[in-house]
């Protein structure tokens, strides 16, 4: 098991959940606007997620545990400024699901936030959900 990668994925997930919550609680959000701090977080996470996929492919359950593997999709889904990247990850996730190396519970919502043209369909939802 790659404990370092699992720890990193879980830390990214924690930060990705705690920042939107703190923005909401502080009341510094604007409806329909992409908060600059959240945008920076997502841009940084997108770059790191690209490197993870380049090096490991989709983190497999056998490599990072179910919790670590499950933490990956929200990182990808929140890459709303790079819809081509999001769309390119779907077949990678699909392959891991076929291998039983990713939870198939992640798959039904895999296209959420992206419409048929590959654009972020609902930026606020895609950036703040999950």
Image (cartoon, rainbow, N blue to C red):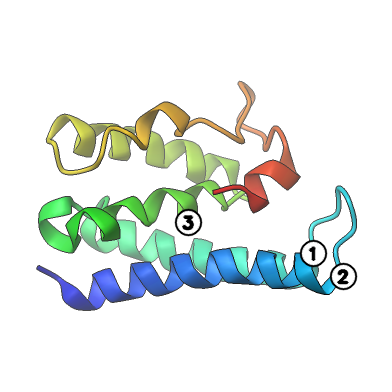
Residue 83 lies, in percent from the top left, at: 58, 41
47 over 82 or under it: above or below = below
Count neighbours of disc 3 (C-alpha within 10 A) and say few if under 14, some if 14 to 19, many if 20 or more.
many
Give the Cα separation between the discs numbered 1 and 2: 8 Å
Give SS at disc 2: loop
Where does residue 111 sit, x and y in percent of width and height? 50, 30
Q: Which mark is residue 28?
A: 2
Left or right: 30 in relation to 125: right
Q: Residue at x 13, y 60 (%)?
A: 63
Viewer-nearest residue: 57 or 106 = 106
Answer above or below: position of 19 versus 103: below
Residue at 88% over, 51% down: 31
Q: Position of residue 110 (x, y in %)?
A: 45, 34
Q: Are marks 3 and 2 in contact (CB under 8 Å)?
A: no
Task: Check disc 1 and report the residue beneath it.
Answer: 35
Q: Disc 1 or 2, which lies upstream in sequence?
A: 2
Q: In the shown orientation, is residue 43 left or right of residue 47?
A: right
Q: Earlier in the sequence, mark 3 or mark 2?
A: 2
Mark drawn on residue 75: 3
Residue placed most toward the observer, 25 or 35: 25
Q: Quadrant of residue 98?
A: top left
Q: Is residue 83 above or below residue 81?
A: above
Q: Which of the 4 image quadrants contains residue 107?
A: top left
Depth-wise, is mark 3 or mark 2 nearer the camera?
A: 2
Q: Are marks 1 and 2 in contact (CB under 8 Å)?
A: yes
- Cα distance between the residues tagged 1 and 3: 17 Å
Label located before the other in sequence (1 or 3): 1
- Residue 118: percent from the left, percent from the top? 60, 31
- Label 3: state its secondary structure: helix
Q: Extreme top residue here?
A: 116
**Element on which disc 1 rests:** loop
């Amino acid at each position: 098991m790659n404990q370092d990668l699992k720890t990193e994925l879980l830390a990214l997930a924690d930060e990705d959940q705690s920042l939107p919550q703190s923005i909401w609680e502080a009341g510094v959000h604007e409806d329909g606007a992409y908060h600059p701090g959240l945008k920076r977080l997502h841009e940084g996470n997108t770059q790191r997620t690209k490197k993870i996929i380049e090096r490991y492919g989709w983190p497999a359950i056998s490599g990072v545990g179910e919790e670590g593997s499950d933490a990956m999709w929200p990182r990808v889904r929140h890459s709303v400024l790079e819809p081509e990247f999001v769309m390119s990850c779907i077949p990678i996730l699909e392959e891991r699901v076929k291998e039983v190396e990713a939870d198939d519970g992640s798959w039904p919502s895999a296209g959420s936030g992206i419409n048929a043209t590959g654009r972020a369909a609902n930026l606020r939802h895609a950036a703040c959900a999950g």
